[in-house]
Image: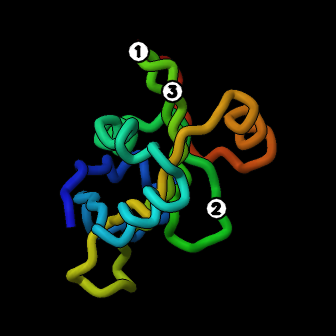
Amino acid sequence: MYFIGKINREIYRCVTESIVSEEVVITENQILHIKERHPGDYERLAKYLQEAVEKPDYIVETNKADTALVLKEIICDETIIKMVIRLVTKHDNPTYKNSIITFMKIDEKEWSRLLRNKKILYYILCQI
């Protein structure tokens, strides 16, 4: 298990009010999942995980409880990341941590489709 960063509970509260942890981790199993299903993305994008977790551009609704779909545009690398984070709530085992389930690079078309078709729970008003 690898520590990625900490969420801002005020931002992620749009997903669930009962978040009990700020820490976000990724497990070996999820890294393997990403490497198998999205070849090259882990190696290219892992350096941006903390930034995406801590400063999301958008959080959109998913069909799974206590789960956030995070969208982050990395300007310097002209890359857009889509990430799924399972948030730990008071109903979960207290030893669990917020966990990255998967992430991948997406294109502008997918970015636009998600923002058009999904309910936006959070977005950053301006980027500096």
Task: Determine the secondary structure under disc 3.
Answer: strand
Q: Position of residue 108 (x, y in %)?
A: 69, 27
Using the numbered discs, state the Cα–Cα distance from disc 2 to disc 3 in whole angstroms.
22 Å
Q: How crowded is the residue under tag 1: few (<14 C-alpha within 10 Å), some, or many (20+)?
A: few
> Which residue is labeled 1 in the image?
76
> Which residue is labeled 3 in the image?
79
Task: Determine the secondary structure under disc 1.
Answer: helix
Q: Are marks 2 and 3 in contact (CB under 8 Å)?
A: no
Q: Position of residue 76 (x, y in %)?
A: 40, 15
> Which residue is labeled 2 in the image?
62
> Which of these two is toward me, 13 or 101?
101
* Amino acid residing under circle 3: Thr
Q: Earlier in the sequence, mark 2 or mark 3?
A: 2
Reply above or below: 40 against 102.
above
> Which of these two is toward me, 16 or 77?
77
Q: Is residue 12 left or right of residue 80?
A: left
Q: Position of residue 52 (x, y in %)?
A: 39, 39
Give the residue displayed 66% in from the left and 44% down from the top: 120
> Which of these two is toward me, 89 or 24?
24
* Amino acid residing under circle 2: Thr
- In which quadrant is the C terminus drawn? top left
